[in-house]
Image (tube, rainbow, N blue to C red):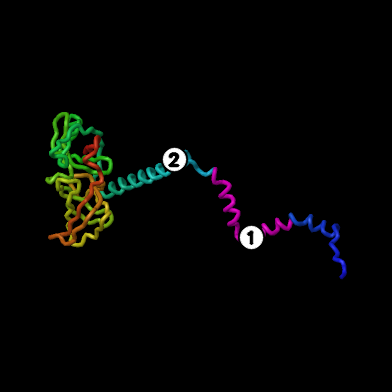
Amino acid sequence: MAPVRLPRVGVLLPLLRLWPWLLVLLALVAVRLSKGSGVTDVYGLLSRPFWPGSAQQEWIRAAERLGDQARLDQLERENRRLRGLLELPAAEGRQLQVAVISREPGGWWQQLVLGKGSLQGIGVGDAVVAPGGLIGLVASTTPTTSTVRLLSDPSSRVGVWVGRSRHHGLLTGLGTGRPLLRFLEKDPDVRPGDVIFSSPASTLVPPNLPVGVIQRINLDADPAPEALVQLSAPADAVDWVQVLLP
């Protein structure tokens, strides 16, 4: 049996010197074939501890709020410009911040009393809004107080329309937190979740104030469909309101 010859060390040395370059070449080929996805994954794992923390996230949210407010301001300016071109009345006048000073337990869904009155310019019929939207109209005033008839009062009647489909209706209070919306058309094209606003055709309140969200629809009601509306402003919990002065 012939003896096995081992390679000479001198022959292996060039190969040993080349293996780091071979590894680099193989890595470049792998990156080329994977289109860099592996490098991206590695970078993501290494940089994860430096991703935005709570402070950076708050900055991002603040920037988003700033952008939203800027867009809202632009839309309001455009709305005022278009209303001016159409010679329509302004959506609202001066806003007066007023505290809620009294509520009657027996009329919790009917009215509330404000701590300012005619001396501050508040008049009968002025619209009253709270965080979330319209809650009612001023029903009576004294020099220092005002009584607000809430949208949930059974004697309340306010013209509204559906923001998505632009169909109009009359919102009537039922003495609860969900007033009844009676549509003016047989086919109002509405569905639960639609937001309703004060109608531009209404002479009682400024147009396009948020009012509530449609909860349940009765398409078989006579003479036209009806819907229960969840008011967007929590009238039963507000402490401060804004009176829209003409």
Please report the bounds of the magenta region as a residue range: 21-49
Q: Amino acid at mark 1?
A: Arg
Residue 179 horizontal/vertical position (percent): 18, 49
Residue 70 horizontal/vertical position (percent): 39, 43
Residue at image point 25% right, 34% down? 97
Label 2 – label 1 distance at C-alpha: 39 Å
| Residue extending farthest right | 2
Residue at image point 82% right, 58% down? 12
- 165 or 221: which is nearer to us? 221
Q: Is residue 87 visible?
A: no
Q: Look at mark 2 in the image and give the residue it sits on.
A: 58
Quarter of image, res 3: bottom right
- 119 or 30: which is nearer to us? 30
Would you call the spot at circle 2 few (<14 residues within 10 Å), some (14-19), or many (20 or more)? few
Quarter of image, res 37: bottom right
Residue at image point 23% right, 33% down? 98
- 208 or 12: which is nearer to us? 12
> Contact (CB < 8 A) between labels 2 and 1?
no
Residue 126 horizontal/vertical position (percent): 19, 39
Q: Is tag 2's residue or tag 1's residue first in the polypeptide sequence?
A: 1
Residue 31 horizontal/vertical position (percent): 63, 58
Secondary structure of the residue carrying tag 2 is helix
* Quadrant location, the N terminus: bottom right
